[in-house]
Amino acid sequence: MFISSPLDADKLESPRILVVSVRGYRFQAANCCIYEFEDLLRDLESAQLYEPKKEVDFARKIYRSAKYAGFSDSCAAKVARFPKDLTLDREYDLLFAILDNPWQMHLLESIKGWQDKCRHKACFIAEMWEPDLQNWRLFKEPWSSFDHVFLGVTRCVEGLSKLIEPPVTYIPPAVDTLRFSPYPNPPQRSIDVSYVGRRSPIIHDALIEKAEKDNFFYYYDTVRGKLEISNPREHRLLLADLFQRSRYNITNYAKFNEAAETGGTQEIGYRFFEGAAAGTVMVGMPPAGDAFPYYFDWEDAIIKVDFSGTDVVETIAELDAQPERLERISRNNVANSLLKHDWAYRWRDMLKVLGLEPSSAMVAREKYLKELAHSILDQVRV
C-alpha cells in the first residue's frame, strides 16, 4: 500500500482519511491539544497518520525559501530535495492536514501522489492572528491545494477569506471529553486551584500568598522557556487527571499577555474546554465578543476575575461558602462539554462541509456522550 511510510497502517483496513500531522517534529506542550484530535480520528475513522520528521520540515523550509525567491514549483522541489516519506498507490476520500500555524502547508510536497489519490483536501489550522494577514509570506503558502480551510480562531476568518481561494470556516477548539470527564467515577478534588500555562503575575502572587499562609493546595507551572513533551498522549492524561482533581481552574483568553503577536484580538483558548470538561469551576477572564457566550451558554460557565486585580482569593472564598452552587457548576460544565465540545462534534461539522458521512464509530460515540451528559444533568435536577 505504501512505500517507505512511517505509518502505523498494519492494523487498519482501507482507511478513507489520511491525516497529515506535525507531531513528528513539533513537540510543544500546546500542540498536544491537536494531537489529541488526531488520536481520536484514528479511533473514530481508522484514519492513517502521516508524521513527517525533522528532515522533511527542513526540506519544507528550503522549498519555501526558494518559492520566496521566485523559483517555480519544480525548481524549488529540486533545490529542497524532499525525502519522499510517503507514496500513495490507493485512493482516499480525504487528505486532512492538521497544522498549528499557516506556514506548514508545503509538508505535502513529501507525499507522492496526494493530488491525484485524495478526492478531497482540507486543512485545520489551529492558530492564526490578525497580524499574520499582513505578512507577505502568507501569499506564498499553497492555499489553492485545499478544497476547504478550517480555522481555529474567529477573528481571521473574514480577512483570510478575502485573501485566499478556498472557503474558510471557523471550527472552535474542542477536547476529548471522555478523557477529561471525571464521570462516571469522579475522584476526590484534592487540589484547591490549578493554574497551568500563561498566567497573570498578580493572580499568581495572590494565590502563592494564600498557599503559604493556609492549608491551600495551589498547583502551578515552575518551568521556563519552551516546554516540550515526549509523549503527547501521556501529557493529556496527566492534564486530565490534574483538572479532574482541581476544584478551581484559573482560565484566561488565549495568549492574553502576547498583544504584539495577537494584535490585541481575543480568542477562546483550549484551557476553557479542558477545564469545563473536567468539571472545574473556572475563574478568570473570557475573551470579548460573541463567540464565548455562544459556545459557553450555560450559567456560571466562568466566574469573571480580571487578571489585573487581586480579588481572586476573595472570589474563591465567596464561592466556597456556596457548596451547592459549586456542585451545580461542576456538573453543568461536564454535561455541557459532553453535549457540545467533544472533538467528535467538530469532526462531524467538518465532514458535513466536505459532503462526507460520519463513521459508525462516531455515531456510537455521540450516542454515549449524550447518554452520559443527561445522566449527569439528571443528578443536577434532583
Image: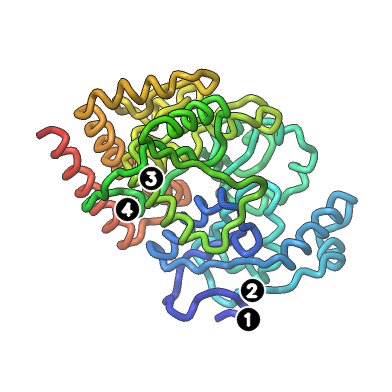
Mark 2 is on which residue type?
A: Leu
Please say if the residues under marks 3 and 4 sit with CB atoms less than 8 Å apart.
no
Q: Residue at x 24, y 38 (%)?
A: 331
Please state the horizontal and vertical placement of residue 178, each as a whole percent of the image: 32, 53
According to the image, label 2 marks what residue? 86
Q: Name the quadrant of the N terminus.
A: bottom right
Please say if the residues under marks 2 and 1 sit with CB atoms less than 8 Å apart.
yes
Mark 3 is on which residue type?
A: Phe
Please say if the residues under marks 2 and 4 sit with CB atoms less than 8 Å apart.
no
Q: Secondary structure at mark 1?
A: strand
According to the image, label 3 marks what residue? 243
Which label sits on residue 178? 4
Distance from Cα at disc 2 to Cα at disc 3: 39 Å
Mark 4 is on which residue type?
A: Leu
- Circle nearer the viewer, 1 or 4: 4
Q: Label 1 crowding class (10 Å Cα cut-off): few <14, some 14-19, many 20+?
A: few
According to the image, label 1 marks what residue? 3
Q: Label 4 crowding class (10 Å Cα cut-off): few <14, some 14-19, many 20+?
A: many
The residue positioned farthest toward the front in the image shown: 213
